[in-house]
Image (cartoon, grey):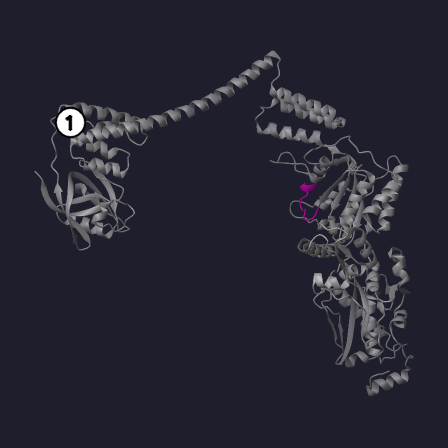
Amino acid sequence: MDLYETLPVVPLRDVVVFPHMMMPFVIGRPSSIRALEHALGKDKRIFLAAQHDAAVDDPHPDDVYTMGCVANVVQSLKLPDGNIKVLVEGVDRARAVEWKEDKGFYRVVVKTLARQRETSGDVEATMSRVVSLFEQYVKLSNNLHYDAMVAAVRVDDPGKLADTIAAHLLVGVDEKQNLLEIVSPLERLNRIAGILEIEVDKLQVDRRIQSRVKKQMEKAQKEYYLNEKMKAIQKELGRKDDKGNEIDELKKKIETSKMPKDVEEKAQQELKRLEAMPPMSAEATVSRNYLDWLIAVPWHKKTRENRDLKHAETVLNEDHYGLDKIKDRILEFLAVRTLVKKPKATILTFSGPPGVGKTSLAKSIARAMNRKFVRLSLGGVRDEAEIRGHRRTYIGAFPGQIVQMMKKAGTLNPVFLLDEVDKMSMDFRGDPSAALLEVLDPEQNSTFLDHYLDVEFDLSHVMFICTANVLHTVPQALRDRMEVLQLAGYTELEKIEIARRFLVPKAVEGAGLTSENIVITDAAISTIIQRYTREAGVRSLEREISSICRKVARKVVVEGGSFSEEIGAEQVTAYLGVPRFRPSAAEEQNEVGIATGLAWTEVGGELLVSEATLMTGKGKLTLTGKLGDVMQESAQAALSYVRSRAAELSLPEDFHSKIDIHVHVPEGAIPKDGPSAGITMATALVSALTKIPARRDVAMTGEITLRGKVLPIGGVKEKVLAAHRAGVTHIVLPRDNEKDLADIPKNVLDALDLHLVSTMDEVLRIALAEPLPPRLSAAVVADVVDTGDAITH
């Protein structure tokens, strides 16, 4: 008999409740909480039905299955977050007939379906079959407790048995809902039997796969065990295995590598250790790598050196223009090697601005001598292990870069370039420059010890060449081991010749052009040098020439292969745009208080003008132009010299007390320092105080003392070349710098009048446009002091 009753409904997500089933779950939706509270307030009966889509938060009647289960609320517990945890017991199947909305929740009129009694004779057999399948299912499944499940299905009621098993099947919500909607117990048992057969088959396949994987693992372990046993048997029989072949191969390599006796002993000792180790152990890999490095390093192989001086001179001239002093030194080195069987090793260091050919010169030396060439860049290296390597106790240890490069060279006597030796730094891991002391010392490098190899290696046959832009960052102890050859900047004539011989042909070829498509004149190259580059080397010059070639290449592609153009000074501006630099030139006319000095920079020399002006004041000296401490002290020394020579300069003794002096060095954003501007600032001060103009065609450099002595300075070649480029014809230099004139090209010296001076008086006679007035007598000086009149000329 069917019964109807009205009950509050709670839609469930991903859960189907069956009769005879105890089910805990948490209710959190406000409508569901109100429905539960309504049920708790009455007879604790509630209707539970599953949602079609679990993602719907506020389900309507169409979102819920009509077939559900009437349940009793056995227990409820309110949680701190407002949710309610409930335990319900399914009672009967029921179908929702009518939905009613009531104060924030739904009530439904449900039709309770009467439990059917099965009288067919097949029920007992079907129940037995289902129980047997379920027991198999539980045995194969890891998620169900076997004893508890077997006890749960020991019931005589076919409907209860079907519902109990259905509740514990690990199948989807749709499948469980289908089982809930089957009213007939026999039909339900048959459906469950079909599901169990499929699930048992799936689980058996999984179990077989697991068993197969386990057997494979056991097989691998068995093979390992048998392999080890076989090795032991072969050892007993005196036979060799693969490892034995590897050991034999390493032994042969050690014998043919012609190592020194002590190194060979160490290698043989390491080989014995390797033989005793399991082949797959980590320690065996470390030993094998170590032996590979010992064998790979060149212990005896040398390349036959070409000592033909004429060939070497030809190669050096082919690759580089100028640099006569450097080339002479290399040829001297080769001559000594020809005469002396074991000459003392020399560490050459090329120092100079970027782009003057230091690295390429080292390659040319290797080519001229027919030696292998290797290059190690030391820029940014700050770990001592980069030079000497890591000890083998560290994981992933390797030899240092010195040994690695020797392996790469494959010979004992390569040309080894240590590039950018001035760019090394140091930190808590050590100082690589200190490690280089052993490498670059001819007395020590025959027994160089790498931490990884841990045996002495002979570097005395290597020709080491270092390069640096500046030497003041190289530690003194390291610099002491070097023979420094300065590569100063190129003159404009040298740059034109280099461009004509090397840069233009290279750029034309690189752009895919021919000599018929483009001709770059000397005037064009000169314009590029003066207006588009500011450097001592030729790197920027090469870039600008390449830029012109690329633009011409575009025209050739557009207008055809027959296109041809001659690049002159005017075409340079058209291709490269507005000039980037104005040529450094002397002043246009003689002026009071302005003197032209000379400065050294890392990219060559520059003109450096010093300006001095006077104002009414109390003797204050102002210095501007971003001057360093040494340069400021030079200005103060210059003023003290002028004050001490006031009478000889026809100045009142207290002239400084009534005026303020301002000394400025233009291009104020650029930092400047050094003592070499001392005589320039002194000349500017004297010119400003005596009102005598300084000559525009005179440039000077030198340090001044309080007694007016002129002391020597550095960078003479770069400064003289800068003056020559700027059109200055007279240069004042300290007499002690006369020795440095030998480095300056003859064509530059012929175009200049050089004045070598020892005192400031000589400087003033040359630098001022007019002679100084006669010395004032004491009476005149006193008269000037009394009247306070300024001295004019």
Q: Is residue 441 visible?
A: no
Query: In the rendered structure, which segment of residues is drawn in magenta?
Result: 378-387
Asked whether residue 626 is drawn in magenta, I would say no
Where residue 288 sits, quadrant-wise, is top right
Query: Which residue shows up at 89% across the image and 56% down it?
Result: 742
**Disc 1: which residue:** 156
Where residue 599 appears, x then y in whole percent? 79, 63
Q: Name the residue nearer the viewer: 425 or 470.
A: 470
Where residue 403 appears, x then y in whole percent? 71, 37
From this view, report whether residue 140 is shown above or below residue 745.
above
Amino acid type indicated by mark 1: Asp
Q: Name the residue nearer the viewer: 581 or 389.
A: 581
Q: Looking at the image, which residue sits at the far bottom?
A: 787
Where residue 312 appears, x then y in whole percent? 85, 42
From this view, report whether residue 755 is shown above or below residue 103.
below
What kind of element bears circle 1? loop
Q: Looking at the image, which residue sits at the far left?
A: 1
From this view, report whether residue 322 is shown above or below residue 262.
below
Q: Name the residue nearer the viewer: 165 or 576.
A: 576
Query: Which residue shows up at 73% across the image and 51% down it?
Result: 513
Q: Is 306 left, or right, of 671 in this rendering?
A: right
Pointer 1: residues within 10 angstroms few (<14), some, or many (20+)? few
Quadrant of the snapshot with the N terminus? top left
Q: Is 541 left, or right, of 11 in this rendering?
A: right
What secondary structure prevails in the magenta region?
loop
Where residue 189 sits, quadrant-wise, is top left
Where residue 423 appears, x then y in whole percent? 71, 50
Query: Which residue shows up at 86% across the image and 38% down it?
Result: 307
Quadrant of the snapshot with the C terminus? bottom right
Asked whether residue 385 is drawn in magenta, I would say yes
Q: Is residue 280 visible?
A: yes
